[in-house]
Image (cartoon, grey):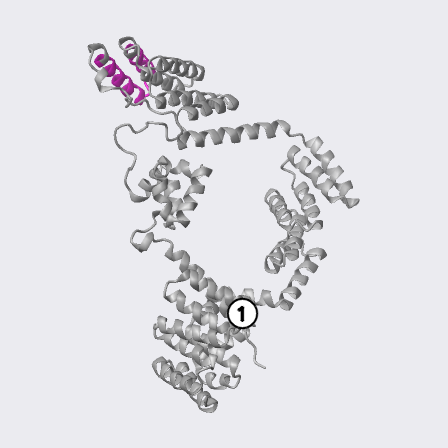
Amino acid sequence: MADKGKAEELKKQGNAATAAGNHQEAVRLYSEAIQADPTNHVLWSNRSAAHASLKQYEAALSDAEKAIEHQPDWSKGYSRKGLALTYLQRHAEAIQAYEEGLRREPGNSLLQQGLQDARAAQQASQSAGPGGAFPNPFADPMLMIKLATNPKTKHLVEDAEFMAKLKMLQANPTMLSSCLQDQRIMLALGALMGVDLQAGPGADDEMRDESPPRPAPDKQESAAAETSSEQRQAKEQKELGNAAYKKKDFNTAIQHYEKALELDPTGMTYLLNLAAVHLEDGQYQKCIDTSLKAVELGRENRADYKLIAKAFSRCALAYSKMQDYQQAKNFYEKSLSEHRTADVKTRLSEVERKLREQKEAAYRDPAKAEEERERGNELFKKGNYPEAIKAYTEAIKRNPDNAKTYSNRAACYTKLASFDLGLKDCDACIKLDPTFIKGHIRKGTLLKGMHQFDRAMEAFQKAIELDENNQEAINGYRECMVSMDNDPDQVKKRALSDPEVQNILSDASMRLILEQMQDNPNAAREHMKNPDIAAKIQKLVQCGLIAFR
């Protein structure tokens, strides 16, 4: 038969031992209390916390599960279980435990903090490969900086397909083995490891920056074909041409390349080098014509498809220099049909962007934009917000530099409660004209509607700085202050973002003390005798996370 009186007395002694930091004694006292009242879930929970403080996490987990067994609807049992599982590095199970507790008691700050800790621990653990033996190179926090500053990989950060694959590898490093055929992944991996994983015979000498490439000895020539005296002399002429090219002595370089072509009329690379000289010398049409001749010669002699791709890419670059972006696009696509490289894909994306900009520039008409904006204003007054949005959108296409149009469209989105879209328009408006007061006020109104009162206050404050007498901004600021004071969620949100509060709530001993105070308000008096604990409790009271009744 349970002796509840004895169990309660032992629990108090255990609580006192915990507050004094004597966790081993607390375990002993709670164990005796459990013998006196084995179905008391609070005792199991308290002993779980004491075990956790002693880093006895398996025992802490076992006690937490006992607490849940005796009181399945008690959220604190799940908090105990989640904490033990987190320390045991069973992160997925820990997350499940905290989520189960929150389903039973939504808004519980201890459970929320525990869930946040468990997720952070899980994310950290994913930086190691299977079994933790091999680190995931793509989990490096400096990853993007390293790729962007490395001349060999800087073009990859603009490759959407590569970035999507990179995010997959960051989340699941076990997929790396299936991605090693992708030369972009190998290039990035080599840059991160400080080695060239693509070096060696046959490496492509495709251009790596915006400047025209220096012709290099082609690596596709067959050693077996280098038997005749003419071919050897042709190679010598090409080397002389390369040396002249590096000195920007283009006339001499051309003479040597043409001589090489006379000696070996099947050498496609000599034409490619000639095309590079014309490109560097600003003779873009000659570069195009020579590159196309190289393609014809290459096809006749069954040249490597990589060389054909390079000739098309050189044509595309020349057209790009001439600002004929449509032709540049066509030839980059031809290059990719022969051989796909990340560099050419990046260049294709760039010319496609420039094509769009050309079309947008041709479509601009400030007069028609103003007509559409006025039409949008009339539709707005009539309450026809969807049609007003269409008119404002057309006005923006005709003149994307008018801040007022973005503000007007944001007003429509506000009326339709499309807060995210309205917020983007407000940001665009403010970027174009930071002194436009209405943009800041509209942004504040949208954020207020999204219950982001702290950010809304910042927006209204900027409007007030521009015009201290603007009543609309002053009223918006005051309404946000009132809403924040009356919204418990906002109070908790602000409190939980405080690093000092986070440290208090993550301390296992303080969690136990707070639970004891909740179960037995009289326990507060005992704990308040300890100055350190009293200061922490006072901090939580000031933040509105706990209150005395």
Residue at (67, 38) in percent of width and height: 393
Q: Amino acid at mark 1?
A: Asn
Badge 1 marks a residue whose secondary structure is: loop
Residue situated furthest right in the rendering: 382
Horizontal and vertical percent for residue 382?
A: 80, 44
Residue situated furthest top in the rendering: 262
Q: Which residues are magenta?
A: 232-259
Residue at (47, 73) in percent of width and height: 77
Q: Main secondary structure of the magenta part?
A: helix
Residue picked out by circle 1: 108
Please state if 178 lies on the left or on the right of 548 as rendered: left
For the residue pair 459 and 182, the one nearer the viewer reads as 182
- The quadrant in which residue 506 appears is bottom left
Query: Is residue 258 rendered magenta in the image?
Result: yes
For the residue pair 444 and 295, the one nearer the viewer reads as 295
- The quadrant in which residue 43 appears is bottom left
Query: Is residue 288 rendered magenta in the image?
Result: no
Few, some or many residues within 10 Å of mark 1 (<14, 14–19, 20+)? some
Identify whether 409 is placed above or below 89. above
Identify whether 150 is placed above or below 79. above
Horizontal and vertical percent for residue 318?
A: 44, 21
Q: Is residue 63 visible?
A: yes
For the residue pair 306 and 158, the one nearer the viewer reads as 306
Residue situated furthest front in the rendering: 1
Identify whether 225 is placed above or below 208. above
Horizontal and vertical percent for residue 227?
A: 19, 14
- The quadrant in which residue 402 appears is top right
Q: Is residue 534 visible?
A: no
Please state if 171 lies on the left or on the right of 364 as rendered: left
